[in-house]
Image (tube, grey):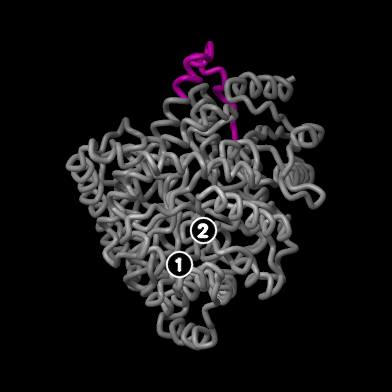
Amino acid sequence: MTNINIKRRFQEQELPDMKTLQAEVDKIAGQVTIGETLFMKKHGVKSEGEYKKKMAAQGRVMKHSHIGWNSWESTAEGFRHIYKTLEESGSTVDRFGVSLDWTMGVPAELRSKIPVGTGLIFNTPEEWKAVGQVVPVQPHFGDHMIGSLNSLENTRLALEAGVTTIGNVSQYYTFEYPGIEMECQRTEDMVKALLLMGRFRDIGAIVHSNLDDGFGSQYHDLANLVGWAMLERYIVEDLMGAGLGHCFGNLFSDPMLRIIFNRAMGKINTHNTPGSMIYGNTIDFGPNFARNFGAMASFSMADAIGQMKYGSGHAICPIPVTEATRIPSADEIIEAHRLVDIMIEKAPLYSSFINWEKVEAEADILVICGRIFFERVLNSLDDMKVDITHPGQLLAVLKAIGPAQLEENFGAGRQDKNAMRGRIPVRPTSIVQTIRQKEETLIEGMDGIDEQPLKGIKVVMGTTDVHEFGKEICKSIVQKAGATVFDMGATVAPAQLIDTMLETESHILLVSTYNGIALSYAKEVLEGFKENHIDAKLIMGGLINENMDGSDLPVDVTEQVRALGVNCDNKAEDLVKNILAIDKEYRA
């Protein structure tokens, strides 16, 4: 496979052997005592995994809510309000997903090197432990835990706080911490954290991996995504002895596809590890709240039906209709739960009319073709002299290769030079279908785009975080219009963009943002322009917001960013026109 281009550093020789790593983790594990949350006391369990198995056996559908406030006071009050209000109305919530700030993903001594985001920051073990002592709802930590630069320490503190489902393996591949180069240490620390989770597997500790947060969101073929999930299971479960619970759903718009994919995940779950949660479909969410209600009803009904039929242990996730425009309030989360309660109530009425044989057949296709991808990847890496029995080596080299090359070289789909990535998907992902539909609609409404008005113009692109949806649409538009595009991918540091601008002599930079750092990111980019004498224009779109003055929720900073000289029109349909106007200025 000499045509594979490994773009990231892969420093195989710097990773310790597994015997050394295991010995170190054994010492740490001997000093860790799993905490007891109010949830564990109420239900008489030692872990969330134990509880999930009981609920799945009873056929009960569990529910999850994601909490994104950045102060502990607001979070604790939100916990109490949501739990009490739902309980009084006869409803329940089983677990809270707590969003930690991205600064928590780096060692404490390095946190000053990156701007504060919009999540919670814990400074002491007591603050970690408090999260499970507010209400009897089990806390879950996903972001900036396993897979970050601080994997082992965060995992240890979470376990001691009684948090036993911990993520997020997928973020190792796509979440970066700009300005902090610790790639080899990051891989080693992640391996140790996974080994530590393996030491507590028997009591129900579960490693969480949201496929849609990592490379999974970038695959075009669902069969390859299933194969990728097999690779993650091989690394986490077979090589390190931990239990892995996959999460998906953010990028699954088709309700039946959610049921089919859930079944496929069950078929490859050879160790019967309960799932973490099925996240809500955010592809169909936008500023139209009435439409968002319809989307939520659609996906939550499918998820409830799937859990009643297959009992995979996943909690379903009511997504507040405001999710696409702001961080939801406690009352909006409660509203979402009440709607989903109705979906759960009515789900049995639909289940008996579903063609379950067809669901099984479709899931089998994904699993069979996914295994082709899985085996091709492992066999080829073995041929490349990668130690496929060392989880750290596998993690590093897979990250180095990236999803596009993995899919192009090892994908299960039939080869076709005219297809995206050179292969016709066995089953295209929802995100690919949706992106193409939106692109076609936008491009059809653009007069003169076929004449390639941007021919000869160079454009550099990237995102501030893992969300690539908007970037992919903009990329297709400007490419269709004739521009030469240098796509830097997701979660790109400003320095990387600056280097690419210099190398390519581009004068237009497109940045998509979502995670509450738009203003500070724009300032850093513009400072890079100034320091490197780059005469260029920044165009920024997405959710142009930032956590300001200690506020609990990020606020819109469009006008502040625009005042810096950044184009913030945020309309894909005007993108070609705006680039032409910028180019005209430079040619004048």
- Above or below, comparing residue 295 to residue 231 in the picture: above
Q: Are marks 2 and 1 in contact (CB under 8 Å)?
A: yes
Q: Position of residue 436 (x, y in %)?
A: 42, 28
| Tally of marks | 2
Q: Is residue 535 magenta?
A: no
- Above or below, comparing residue 536 to residue 173 in the picture: above
The residue shown at (37%, 55%) is 60
Q: Which of the 4 image quarters holds residue 265?
A: bottom left
Distance from label 2 to label 1 (Cα)?
9 Å
Q: Position of residue 417 (x, y in %)?
A: 30, 34
- Above or below, comparing residue 291 to residue 460 in the picture: above
Q: Position of residue 418 (x, y in %)?
A: 32, 30
Q: Say the numbered circle drawn on residue 48.
A: 1
Q: Quadrant where the N terminus lies? A: bottom left
The local crowd at label 1, few if under 14, some if 14 to 19, many if 20 or more residues have their Cα within 10 Å, is many
The residue shown at (70%, 42%) is 518
Q: Amino acid at mark 1?
A: Glu
| Relative depth, front residue between 527 and 305 | 305
- Above or below, comparing residue 271 to residue 286 in the picture: below
Q: Which of the 4 image quarters holds residue 461?
A: top right
- Which residue is denoted by mark 2 in the rendering? 95
Which residue is situated farthest in the top direction here? 447
Q: Position of residue 67 (x, y in %)?
A: 60, 52
**Which tag, 2 or 1, sits closer to the chain's start?**
1
Left or right, residue 245 beside residue 477: left
Magenta segment range?
439-459
Q: Amino acid at mark 2?
A: Arg
Q: Say the numbered circle drawn on residue 544.
A: none
Asked whether residue 402 is in view, the answer is no
Asked whether residue 557 is in view, the answer is yes
